[in-house]
Amino acid sequence: MKTTIEFNLPEEESEMRYALSGVDALIVISNIRAELRSAWKHDTGRFKSFSSEQIDILSEFITEQEKEYNLPELI
C-alpha cells in the first residue's frame, strides 16, 4: 500500500511542515516520558525536583492526550 500526500506550495507550506513534523513531535513526547521515568525511578534528570504525585499527574495527562489523539507509539 502506498499513500501520497500533496501540498500546494507556497499556500500550504504550514500544513506541509505540520505533516512532516509528526515524528519529531512523537520523539519529544518520548523524551519527556524518559525524563519523567528517570525522575521517578532514580531521582535524576530535569524533573528530579518534582514530587511523585506531580510526576504521576504529568504522566497520566500525557497518556490521556496520546489516547485522545490516537497517537502511535514509537518503536
Image: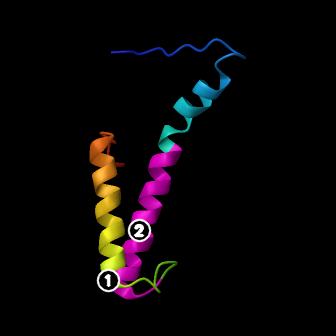
Mark 1 Cα shell of 10 Å, populated few (<14), some (14-19), many (≥20): some
What kind of element bears circle 2? helix
Magenta part of the protein: which range? 24-44
Of all residues shown, which one is farthest toward the right?
A: 10
C-alpha distance separating marks 2 and 1: 15 Å
- Decide whether the magenta segment is chiefly helix, strand or loop: helix
Query: In which image quadrant can residue 54 be found?
Result: bottom left
Amino acid on which disc 2 is placed: Ala
Query: In which image quadrant can residue 14 be found?
Result: top right
Give me the residue at 34% from left, 81% from top. 40
Which one is closest to the eye, mark 2 or mark 1? 1
Instruction: Please tell me whether residue 75 belongs to the stretch shown in magenta.
Output: no
Placement of 32 over or under 45, stated as above or below = above
Give me the residue at 32% from left, 83% from top. 52
Amino acid on which disc 1 is placed: Ser
Q: Which mark is residue 39?
A: none
Give me the residue at 46% from left, 84% from top. 48
Residue at which label 1 appears: 52
Q: Residue 22: percent from the left, percent from the top? A: 49, 39
Residue at which label 2 appears: 34
Q: Residue 6: percent from the left, percent from the top? A: 55, 13
Query: In which image quadrant can residue 13 be found?
Result: top right
Q: Residue 57: percent from the left, percent from the top? A: 31, 70
Give me the residue at 44% from left, 72% from top. 35
In the image, is 69 to the left or to the right of 25? left
What kind of element bears circle 1? helix
Q: Residue 43: percent from the left, percent from the top? A: 41, 88
